[in-house]
Amino acid sequence: MIVAIDGPAAAGKGTLARRIAAHFQLAYLDTGAIYRAAAFQAVAAGDDPADPVAAEAAAKRVRAEQLADPKLRDEAVGKAASVVAAIPGVRAALLAFQRDFASHPPAGSRGAVLDGRDIGTVVCPLADVKLFVTASAEARALRRFKELQEQDPGAIYLRVLQDMKDRDARDSQRQAAPLAPAPDAVVLDTTALDADAVFKMACDIVGRKVAL
Ligand code: CDP
């Protein structure tokens, strides 16, 4: 059983993917963390994340143990991740890791949930369930702004909104595996929905597949 969850930044994919994984006893892979780790490695080595040779070498150094590092969650790392993610060699270097996780999830799980930008289109085109979780840029920026404000009371909403729009543009307009719903994905627009409502809708969709 493979569940693919794609969508733009701060649409609520991660929260949903974790809950779906726990509910249906599936293993969870946050594929954004892999791109974040590649970007982090490139910057830590003193390289420009936009340099294709350095970024691909950094992607090849990514190891599963690094993915839980809290430093990967910084906004600056997210921004750099969307820069390395546009480089075809980086995507190619990270593809096998993701496919291997999907086809051989850790023992004890009944399958896998992967969230990202291209899971339903490129990484797992034969996934049993494909969800595309989205929301307006303003709603997503507001969610990200509230999270940021907890760490930094000086956070500025309009700057968060602009960063969100820049990241959406980079992710949607790149040549390599751009952010887009697979033709057979169910689109969940969460602009006016809370996390519980989205979880319930997704549970119904996944539950129907499990029952087959
Ligand atoms: O958590 P947030 O939605 O802000 O971002 P993320 O899922 O951690 O992903 C960070 C960046 O990695 C994205 O902006 C994408 O450019 C890239 N990414 C990708 O290209 N393909 C994926 N499957 C996952 C992430």
Image (tube, rainbow, N blue to C red):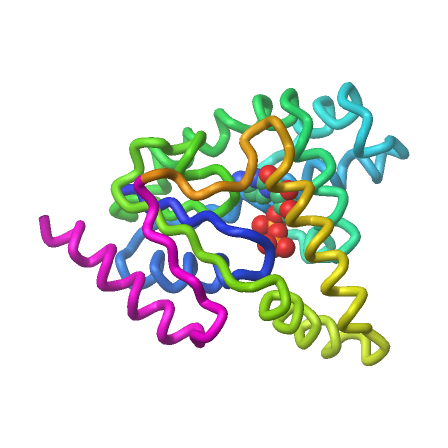
Q: Quadrant of residue 157?
A: bottom right
Seen in the picture, residue 25 relative to 199 is either above or below; the reply is above
**Number of marks in the image?**
0
Seen in the picture, residue 45 relative to 16 is either above or below; the reply is above
> Quick check: 52 left or right of 116?
right
> Quick check: 67 left or right of 164?
left
**Quadrant where the N terminus is found in the figure:** top left
Residue 29, horizontal then vertical, whole percent: 47, 46
Seen in the picture, residue 75 relative to 48 is either above or below; the reply is below
Whether residue 67 can be seen here = no
**Residue at 25% of width from left, 47% of height from top?**
110
Q: Quadrant of residue 136?
A: bottom right
**Residue at 51% of width from left, 48% of height from top?**
30
Q: Is residue 5 magenta?
A: no
> Quick check: 22 left or right of 72?
left
Whether residue 80 can be seen here = yes
Point out the residue furthest to the left here: 212
Residue 61, horizontal then vertical, whole percent: 68, 28
**Pick the front one: 155 or 105:** 155
What span is colored magenta in the figure?
Answer: 184-212
Residue 11, horizontal then vertical, whole percent: 53, 61
**Residue at 79% of width from left, 52% of height from top?**
76
**Pick the front one: 17 or 139:** 139
Point out the residue furthest to the right here: 46
**Residue at 76% of width from left, 74% of height from top?**
151
Residue 93, horizontal then vertical, whole percent: 59, 23
Q: Is residue 208 magenta?
A: yes
